[in-house]
Amino acid sequence: MNTQLPDDSSPQELADPVGSIAEYLRRHRDFFVDYPELLADLVIPHASGKAVSLVEKQIEVLREENRQLKTRFRELVAIARDNEDLARRMHRLTLRLVESSGPAATFAVLDEGLRADFAADFVALRILAEPAPGHDGRPPEFIGPDPLLKTLFAEALDRRQPICGRLKRNQQEALFGGDADAVGSVAVLPLLGRHWQGLLAIGSRDPRRYHAEMGIDLLAHLGDIASLIIDPWVAVPGGPVRPA
C-alpha cells in the first residue's frame, strides 16, 4: 500500500500529519473499499459512556477470531514446509539404505543418516528376534524376543503406526537406558517382517522436535523400508540362528 501523501500536499498538511491523514481520507472516500483489511485493526469507540456496545463486543470477538485464524494458518504453513523437507531427507536416506550391504553396514547408515539429516540425538534399533545364520557376527540390534518391549509398545506394533511426542518414563528407559532423562521427544517406528517385530526409535533433546502433527506417513514409509531390508537377516522361528 502506498502511504505517501499526494504530490499536491501543502506545507501545512506536512506539518500536521494527523490532519493530513484526515484530509486524505476525505479526498479518497473509497480508501477502505480498496483496503478492507485495515478495518479489522481500527478501534472506533461508541459514545455509550462506560458501557460497551454490542457492536463493539461483536467486533472485538471477530478480531480475536481473526488473530487466531492467522496464527493457525502460519502454524499449518510451517508444518507443511517441515513435511516437505522431511520428504526430501527421507528419500535421500532410503536410497542410501537400499545401496548398503549387510546388517552392520545398513545399521551404520541408518544411525548416521538419522543423526545427520534428521537431527536425531539418540537412535535405538531393537529387533525382537534372533539373527539368521550366514551374516557377519551377531549385531547387538538383535535382542531376541522381549515381552516387556512388546507390552510397552503394543499399541504401535498392533496398529502399525508410528507414535510421536513424549513417551512414558518406562518406555523411554526401555529404549534409551541411561539417556532416557535427556530425551525430550521421540518418534517410534514399528518394524514388522514376515515373522518378527521390532522398533526404531529416534530421540531428540528438543521436546518440540517430534510431535503428533508431523509427517507420520513419511515416518511409516521409513519403517516399511527398514523392515524390508532387515527381513532376510532374521531367523525363521524354529530354524537355525546365528550363534552368540
Image (tube, rainbow, N blue to C red):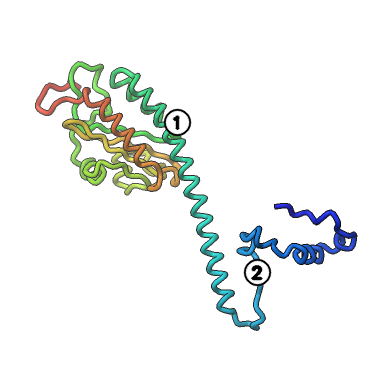
Residue at (36% x, 37% y) in the render: 218
Quadrant where the C terminus is found in the figure = top left
* Number of numbered labels in the structure image: 2
- Callout 2: helix, strand or loop? loop
Label 2 sits on residue: 43
- Callout 1: helix, strand or loop? helix
Q: Nearer the viewer, residue 233 or 46?
A: 46
Q: Amino acid at mark 2?
A: Val
Residue at (67% x, 81% y) in the render: 47
Q: Quadrant of residue 231?
A: top left
Q: Nearer the viewer, residue 145 or 212?
A: 212
Label 1 sits on residue: 117
Q: Is residue 229 above or below residue 85?
A: above
Q: Quadrant of residue 66?
A: bottom right
**Which residue is at the far right?**
11
The label nearer to you, 1 versus 2, is 2
Q: Which mark is residue 204?
A: none
Q: Quadrant of residue 52?
A: bottom right
Looking at the picture, how far across and down is residue 105, in whole percent?
Answer: 33, 20
**Which residue is at the far left?**
238
Q: Nearer the viewer, residue 198 or 232?
A: 232
Q: Is residue 1 above or below residue 85?
A: below
Looking at the picture, how far across and down is residue 136, in whole percent?
Answer: 25, 16
In this orientation, does residue 109 appear? no
Relative placement, left or right, of 131 versus 211 is left
Mark 1 closeness class: few <14, some 14–19, many ≥20 residues within 10 Å: some
- Label 1 vs label 2: CA separation? 48 Å
